[in-house]
Image: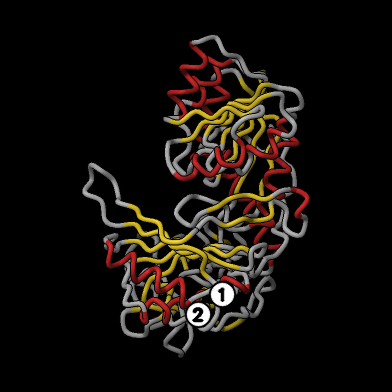
Amino acid sequence: MPDQIEIDDLAPGGEGVARVGGRPVFVPFAAPGDRIEVEIPPGEDAAHPGPGRLLRAGPDRVDPPCPHFGPGPEPDRLCGGCEWLHLRYDRQLREKERGLVEALRRIGRLEPGSYPLLPILPSPEPLRYRSRAKFHVDRDGERLVFFRRRSHQPVQLRTCHLLEPGLDRLREEFGPALARARLRPGEVALEWSVHAGRGSALLRGIDVGEGTRRRCQELLEATPSISGVVLEGDGDGRRGRPVAVVGDPVLLHERVPGDPAAGLARSRPDIFQQANRGANARLVAAALAMLRPEGLDVLELFCGSGNFTAPLARRAGSVAAVEGQGPALELARAELSGGNVRFFAGDALAIAGALGREGRRFGALLLDPPRDGMKGLGSLLRDLRAPRAVYVSCDAATLARDVRGAVAAGYRVATVQPVDMFPQTHHVEAVVLLEQA
């Protein structure tokens, strides 16, 4: 028999939370204050009953604009792309701040109020903000699709309210174009440049031989909205994945959307790049405002294709930028080699440690590691003895872990700035200023 429950909280993973006899019940697509009817499975552990039937809406619930979001009678519902499309945006921002503060308390052992917390920077656009996205290929319908939540069932997208309009149009066009070119990748990543008015594509899990490259050339000739394609085959575990390039997949984006005078950034669909260009401009500005690099020698670790490097170089005395060898570093070098930037290819921690042992000293550090963070941050800060470091993170848990190590190494948390890079999801970015205590 169905149970009627009241949602009173949101979980860090985005689900609504109710408590039945002290037992937590996690319900997707639910909002605080909702009254919901669900089938709760027997047991004593946390329950995950799946979507329920809404009986009464809470005060922070809004009507989601997407026909694929949440439960419903239509077959193409329960899309896994969004979590919070039914929540007011201001409530999303509050929850992201709360989740970051809780991670810093629980994992980083930093009590709320022991450090300055700035108000979260919202995304300039809460919808239609993504300039890049990954898709699956629907083998039957010749379309690019998302999967349903926690499944491999395709959602036949009619539109996606997260994608920039140009990217959404490209998604609609590209699936049939692949079929006509007889190309069947395992995964497709698309990127769109508003500045160029064109896109590029990454085809994963596909043969990279001459026949495939020839068909990709035909695809480009038949699809003017695509400037180039990167092919990525399956690796053997030792040599990595074979890669081939057809056309010119490098795109130029305005570093500050709507302000070409702020410069252009190079990107390619097979390298990491922030998907939300507007929020990224705010992220970069916040990080450099904390860093205060004017005239300093700065060490930048995990520089990627130069997201921070170019604006940093305009203000710093010199920049030593470190990134693993690959196309991201090639793009950064193409734009910034010479002048006051010197690039180092290899493992970030190893190179930073070697620079420290050589006696190099830096006025500030800028750190933008991948999601798994930067174990050993405390030791690195201790060895380099930089007066301050700015740490940019897309994962609150690894950020809190690494900040704890920095505090143990004699640094204090001087500022925490949350940034919303991914509206309609629970994810939150953060910029943290660390200073020698």
Question: In this image, 276 relative to 3: left or right?
Answer: right
Disc 1 and disc 2 in contact, CB within 8 angstroms: yes
Is residue 80 visible to the viewer in this orientation of the structure? yes
Front one among 399 and 362: 362
Q: Position of residue 283 (x, y in %)?
A: 68, 46
Above or below, 249 relative to 236 = below
Amino acid carrying label 2: it is Glu
Q: Which residue is mark 2?
A: 172
Q: Quadrant of the C terminus?
A: top right
Q: Which residue sits at x=65%, y=74%?
A: 61
Specify few, some or many for label 2: CA neighbours under 10 Å numbering under 14, 14-19, or 20 or more: some
Q: Which residue is mark 1?
A: 168
Is residue 33 visible to the viewer in this orientation of the structure? no
Q: How many marks?
A: 2
Specify few, some or many for label 1: CA neighbours under 10 Å numbering under 14, 14-19, or 20 or more: many
Amino acid carrying label 1: it is Asp
Q: Quadrant of residue 231?
A: bottom left
Q: Position of residue 419 (x, y in %)?
A: 66, 50
Above or below, 190 relative to 55 = above
Above or below, 274 relative to 313 = below
Q: Which residue sits at x=58%, y=62%?
A: 9
Q: Position of residue 154 (x, y in %)?
A: 38, 78
